[in-house]
Image (cartoon, grey):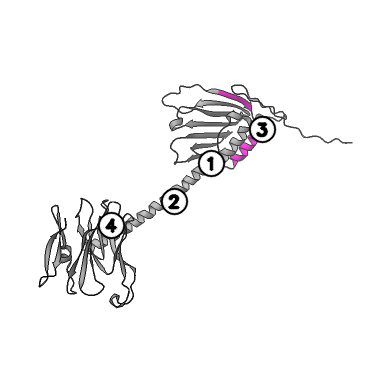
Amino acid sequence: MKMKTLPKLTVIVAFCVSGFTCIGQNKNGSSLEKYSSFSMYYSFAGLGSNMGHMFPTLRIHGTNFTYTKEQNSYYGKPDLKPDSICKGTLRTSSIDSILSLVKAVKQRSTFLSNDGVRSGGIYNMSIVNGKDTVGYEMMNTFDWIPLKIVAIINQYLPMDNKIWASEELITNRINYEKYEEKMHLEMEQEKKVEAKLANEINAIREAHSDSIGAKIIGDWNGHGTQIIASSTILKSGKGNPVENGTPSEWAIIFSSKMVDTLKIGCCEPILINDGILMGKYQDALSVFQAPGNGCVYAFTTYGCDWNGSWHKIIEPFLIPNGCAELSKRELQGKVVREGEMVYYYKTDFSSEPFKEIKTKAW
């Protein structure tokens, strides 16, 4: 009658008290010689407010390990002595698990960083097996393989002195990388928009219409940036406004989000950059606007504040032109600045023919 041979059991006897020896024994009779070329190093070096503090340091040679707290970062020279936590022995199965994990790593040296954190510290881990070495340098972050290795090692360490590492360190880095990528794409898009805007501004200047027309440029909010102002129809009218029709609604839109849209009602306008009338920076915007019917046009001058809001700085005045087109020079001369004084030329409807009266705005 044959007896079944029972498999050999691996029995681990381990205890660990801070400052004393942590003993683990392999009692399966297996040869430990093949693990003699295995070693591992782990440390955390504090940065910023953590600089100079004592942090966990682990050294493994073969199946034996020492676990200490050390001053892994400092200014000048270290001024604190290492503090021994415990010593111990790893199960060969644990070493096999570690080697199995790093075997799948294609990149032998890995540097990772969460650039969104300015303090924290650097996690270092290196695993050596013969001539094969895998190293990690992780600034304010961690990686999946080292996290699994830490889980294996923590089985041998005291409850109150485990190596701290978490998935949160990894996900925080991944999320910040996604944020940086998003910001990069947005910046690239902004560069394209700025290039397109610069080309449009140059085209307006080359057409000699940068100060008067349906599309002009100016530093409207005083931020030192040239912004395009364009007239546009917000809502198309129906029929003749004089005969119960609905007039079109016009507005002036701007190439910068820093300047509000300026609604001007009916009807088709000519825009004029009247230069700096108030303060020292903002260009004033005048609107020469066709009537709903007839040949008497309205002339209104607006100013934009630093926050991009518009307000009238000269109340509208009427200009009869007999339905004849006024020259650019005539329109640009309706509002003028002389020293610290601003004047506008309004029409005296009581005279025959109509005369312009130079009127002080302020």
Q: Are marks 4 and 1 in contact (CB under 8 Å)?
A: no
Q: Is residue 250 inside the magenta stretch? A: no
The residue shown at (83%, 36%) is 4
The answer to which image quadrant residue 32 occupies is: top right
Q: Are marks 3 and 1 in contact (CB under 8 Å)?
A: no
Provide the residue designation for mark 2: 182
Q: Nearer the viewer, mark 2 or mark 1?
A: 1
Q: Are marks 2 and 1 in contact (CB under 8 Å)?
A: no
Q: Amino acid at mark 2?
A: Lys
Q: Amino acid at mark 3?
A: Thr
State which tag comes first along the sequence, 3 or 1.
3
For the residues labelled 2 and 1, the Cα–Cα distance comes to 21 Å
Q: Nearer the viewer, mark 2 or mark 4?
A: 4
Residue 142 position, x and y percent, is 52, 39
The answer to which image quadrant residue 198 occupies is: bottom left
Residue found farthest to the right: 1
Provide the residue designation for mark 3: 92
For the residues labelled 4 and 1, the Cα–Cα distance comes to 48 Å
For the residues labelled 4 and 3, the Cα–Cα distance comes to 77 Å
Q: Amino acid at mark 1?
A: Glu
Q: Amino acid at mark 4?
A: Trp
State which tag comes first along the sequence, 2 or 4.
2
Q: Quadrant of the N terminus?
A: top right
The answer to which image quadrant residue 126 occupies is: top right
Provide the residue designation for mark 4: 310
Residue 233 position, x and y percent, is 32, 68
**Residue stretch rendered in magenta on the structure:** 84-105
Answer above or below: position of 111 versus 64: below
* Label 1 SS: helix
Disc on res. 168: 1
